Amino acid sequence: MLDDLLGNRLLSAALVVVGVPVVLVGYILLVEAVLRRLPRRWSPRARPWLWLAPALVFLGVFLVYPAISTILRSFYNRRNDEFIGLENYAWFFNAPDTLIALRNNALWVVFLTGLVVGVGLLVAILVDRVRYEGVVKSVVFLPMAISWVAAGVIWRLMYDFNPNIGTLNAAVTATGGDPIAWISTEPINNFMLIIVGVWMLTGFAMVILSAGLKGISAELLEAARVDGANEVQVFRQIVLPLLAPTIAVVATTIVIYALKTFDVVYVMTSGEFGTEVIANRMIRELFISGQQGRAAAIAVVLFIAIVPMMILNIRRFRQQEAIR
Amino acid sequence: MMESWHPARRLATLLVVGSLVLAACSGGDGGASPGATTDGGAASPPAGESPAASPSGDGGGTGFQCENIGGEVSVVGSWSGAEQDSFLAMVAPWEECSGATVNYTGSRDLQTQLTTGIAGGNLPDLAGLPGPGLMKEWYDQGALKPLDFVDFEAYSSSTPAGFAELGTAEDGTLIGIFTKAAVKGLIWFNPKHWTAGEPASWDELQQSAQSAAQELGGDAAAWCVGVESGGASGWPGTDWLEDIVLRQSGPDVYDAWVRGEQKWTSPEIRQAWETFGEVLSASHGGPNYIVNTNFGTAANPMFSDPPGCLLHHQASFITDFFKNEAGAAEGDYDFFVMPDINEQFAGSITGAGDLFGMFNDTEQARSLVQYLLTPEAQQIWVERGGFISGNRNVPLDAYPDETSRRSAQILQEAQTFRFDGSDQFPGAMNEAFFSAVVRFATDQSQLDAILSELDTVQADAYGG
């Protein structure tokens, strides 16, 4: 009976869609009923915890527990039956593949962040003064709506070696050149992949920076101009310092994206031709090499690399909240 | 017909790549999805009319007797679409006589699904296995159950030499059985442009190919090679190298290589890479073309006029791509087996097959395993097309088309049969091999560095 019920996918989908909210609302009603019976002093203290409890349980089961078990797993061998200390980490910092991955992630961090913030800022400033700002912003923002995998597929076709398929090589051959193997030629291929990331994320940076730009009071800029500052001076002495917190938030977000880069590389080169990145290496160690311990170590390294960025981001966020 | 490559990774990437190619060729015919054409193409008689539909025979010596046991058995395999229909047709007589139900699920990524299943304890009774390497690992982990109830002698005597043994673990226990088989190392040509017939030796083939290419002039080259395949890029080259090693240095070196005891830097393996290098140098388009061209479209220049290349090395599934990617018709292609390189090892072929293993030891699972080994069961799928049986008791005239009949004949007459070597490597070794082919095809002068890196991976990957 239960099997039949679960076997019917539509029915179980309906069950989940209706059931989960019902259970949650039921839980809240139950909590309030319990709180009413508690002594008066207790209920204000207990209420936030009881309301938070479902979220905390989910967070614990699906985030904290897997994170801790991954960290522990990274100290064990392939079969998970022998403690081997830091051996997986020693492997990570010595294997040629992972070192290339580290180098490439560093390239991604520097160039993706630099280009996205730079181009985003440039577009934001330029369109700030034109009438058709909305249109330009929409166009630049549009790629954000595309999934990373689809972006990888689109650009793979753009870069295709066959000039009948690849737009870039069609242009190259039309001007009389020989087709260039964009994806398989080192070192340009890493930059060709990073360009895909720039195409995807510039819109995001632009929108946030543009909002920050609008927050700078017009009087301030006016005063500077009256005092004889030229546009470059206005930008460097006034706009940039005032925009700094926003740029920092955007930059840290992009750095996290760069560290987590996976989809574009997986779709376009799968790490071949010296374009390997850490996340792709992790997938390969786990599912192809069957090295769970090493995959866990890679996950931990990635995690450790991202944590400072998260902390930075949260601090900035708090500061901004405090200003408000 | 996906039998001859990793169903898991290759199918997944094939689907991605296939849709790319489709998206790219605007106005291409809608039926060109390479993942969807899995049938052999010939009209197949309904299973009911076949004389093989009664499984109560002597089971080809495997001692299978169908008993009414009821219950059910869960099966996960890589087959979908037409292949899934054929599998279900094959097990239908068993379901009828045993009263048991087969719950089949097709999976595009067996490796991931079963790896996760083993970790989580949620496994089917029977499952297709991605290859002998993982099969052994899973047996060592205790996940795969021994098939000691199968009469191994009867089973192995009905298959080519060394075929059934591939399903055994280090300790000699049978843990995987073959149903579907495939012959690799077929050399395809376009009869309009290749008139030299079947050469007697590798040297003769290379010479005729060179002179034929020179005669055509222009950009024409002897070989069509393309090794791009998404996450599995390089695999067509690994098939090449396996065929060369087996024919050049023989089964002993091949086996040692597969076991991880033959160094990549050894003269035998090195020589194979050099031979492959000669092929690459005589290939259409040069290094950038080779590493950026998908295996499915690699043979397209063979069918253009004038042709860009004359010969293409690939397993039998490639005919689907000839038809759907290059627009070739039935008579536009033909094949011969890759010729012997060293006379001493004449009649050696490589191939692959779909392994089946048991994760839950139930009465129904045991019965179904024994049934699948019977020639009567396999003949059902053979007649529906797209299936080559490793069992000699399946008559050759049961095959519906010429390619599969000749493949089956090659398989049955082989002096030495060896399973796709890279599929038996540990995962990390296999991955490094794929990647090494791509690097080598990009720049042959890197061979020394590539081989010594492969040695490092070998030392690490076989350690457990």
Image (cartoon, grey):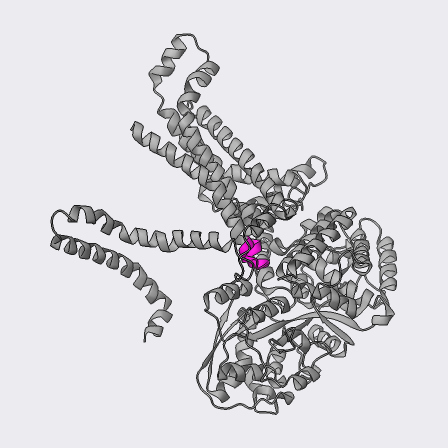
Whether residue B383 is situated above or below residue B419 in the rendered picture: below
Q: Residue at x 44, y 83 (%)?
A: B71
Residue A270 visible, this angle: no
- Where residue A201 appears, as percent x and y from the top left, is 48, 37
Q: Nearer the viewer, residue B213 or A24?
A: A24
Quadrant for the N terminus of chain B, please. bottom right
Q: Quadrant of residue B358?
A: bottom right
Residue A95 visible, this angle: yes
**Residue A65 located within the stretch drawn in magenta:** no
Q: How many marks?
A: 0
- Where residue B99 appears, as percent x and y from the top left, is 46, 87
Q: Is residue B377 left or right of residue A124?
A: right
- Where residue A260 appears, as percent x and y from the top left, is 50, 44
- Where residue B190 appears, as percent x and y from the top left, is 77, 63
Q: Residue at x 45, y 18 (%)?
A: A235
The prevailing secondary structure element of the residues shown in magenta is helix
Q: Nearer the viewer, residue A161 or B218?
A: A161
Q: Residue at x 39, y 12 (%)?
A: A224
**Residue A287 located within the stretch drawn in magenta:** yes
Whether residue A154 is situated above or below residue B150 in the rendered picture: above
Q: Is residue A7 left or right of residue B351?
A: left
Q: Is residue B107 left or right of residue B258?
A: left
Q: Residue furthest top?
A: A227
Quadrant for the C terminus of chain B, please. bottom right
Q: Residue at x 61, y 86 (%)?
A: B376
> Which span of residues is magenta-colored?
A284-294
Q: Nearer the viewer, residue B174 or A268?
A: B174
